[in-house]
Amino acid sequence: MQTRFSTRWCSGWRQPKSIMAKNKRQNLASNIKLSGGAYTDIRDLIRLRYAVRELDSLTLPKSTNPLAGLLTSNFRGRGIDFAEVRVYQPGDDVRTIDWRVTARTQTPHTKMFQEEKERPVLILVDQSISMFFGSQVAFKSVVAAEAAALIAWTNLDRGDRVGGIVFNENRHREIRPRRSKHSVLRLLHEINDFNHLLSRQALSAQSNPEQAGAAGAENIQQNHFAGNSFEKSDLEKSYMAQNYLAEALRNVRRVAKHGSTIFLVSDYRSLNEQARIHIRQLARHNDIVGIFVSDPLERSLPTPDLYTITDGTRKAKINTANKQYRRSYEDAYDQYVKELRSEFARIKSPLLEISTSEPLVQTLSKRFSEQAAQVVRG
């Protein structure tokens, strides 16, 4: 008997809400346009939750995928996530028999499940003065904030507990990992607050660390003889200005549990020996993923001419027509990147490179896909 559907019924049919919501998210993800510029927009950081599907195409094995949300082991048993159906074998639990497949194939089949292991995710976000730079679409500090937001939303969407540490030269702020939207929003607001501290006043206060150190030494001596206590001297702030990445990593070692996934979003300009030691120690019991943020102007100088440059408080002129200077500039950057890649290769951790001149969502998705292909080949 042939079945007919009325035109009236078909015209009134609607997709299930779950499919409609998924299509809406995909449309929003494809239409996301980030503001860029010198400062973050909290609305952009929140809106990036619609772009999590852009990273769903990752093909990394679940047991090695840092964005897998729930770390799954190679052991297959009874768990939450369905894995496959296979032919029943002696000793299998009869409660997992798939009766539909058994009836269709006339051969006993059993369901297999993937065992789950939850992993906390920590995202370190560098909002220091060296990040307050950009020559094209956005500053490095803005790209770092947006990358951290995308990673946070993606891991939350996959069921992980997400937290992080936002830091600059003088201080840091911790958000404990939790599986909640509120935790991610707190992290994003902290990132936004730190980003907006990168103002002309902040640049002026940190433009002369040597003078701050001398003043701090005098302050320490005066307070020592007076018998007074003080919280943080200018000398200590000067020390922090040179070792803030190492201090941030030291704090991560204090709060991170073994088996965590740690994303470090930075330009690594303060990656000294102390910071390297902390990274190596963290890599012994955790998965480290480096996100290296750079700007095209750091790689090579602009076209030959006389340029006026400023750090917000001082001005200087540079002549980029000198070929030897241009070559030395590019060689210094290449050596810097080579050493950074070598450090992450030493701890067998991926280093994903993103630029201020490239669209963030597509670039980050491409970098993870490239890393996935490399893991599969390896």
Image (tube, rainbow, N blue to C red):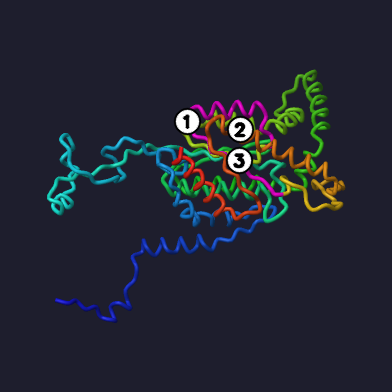
Residue 21: image x %, image y %? Answer: 41, 62
Residue 374: percent from the left, percent from the top?
49, 41
Q: Which residue lies under the disc numbered 1?
A: 257
At a point 34% along the width and 71% down the height, the residue shown is 14
Pointer 3 residue: 166
How many numbered discs?
Answer: 3
Q: Amino acid at mark 1?
A: Lys
Residue type for callout 3: Val
State yes or no: discs 1 and 3 in contact (Cβ < 8 Å). no
Q: Alpha carbon of mark 1 to alpha carbon of mark 3: how far? A: 18 Å
User: Residue at coordinates 58% horizontally, 33% vertically from top-left?
Assistant: 344
Give the residue type at disc 2: Ser
Q: Is residue 236 above or below residue 59?
A: above
Residue at 56% from the left image edge and 46% from the top image edge: 148
Instruction: Provide the residue designation for mark 2.
Output: 342
Secondary element under disc 3, as helix, strand or loop, is strand
Which residue ends up furthest to the bottom in the rendered image? 7
Q: Residues within 10 Å of mark 2 (few under 14, many from 20)?
A: few
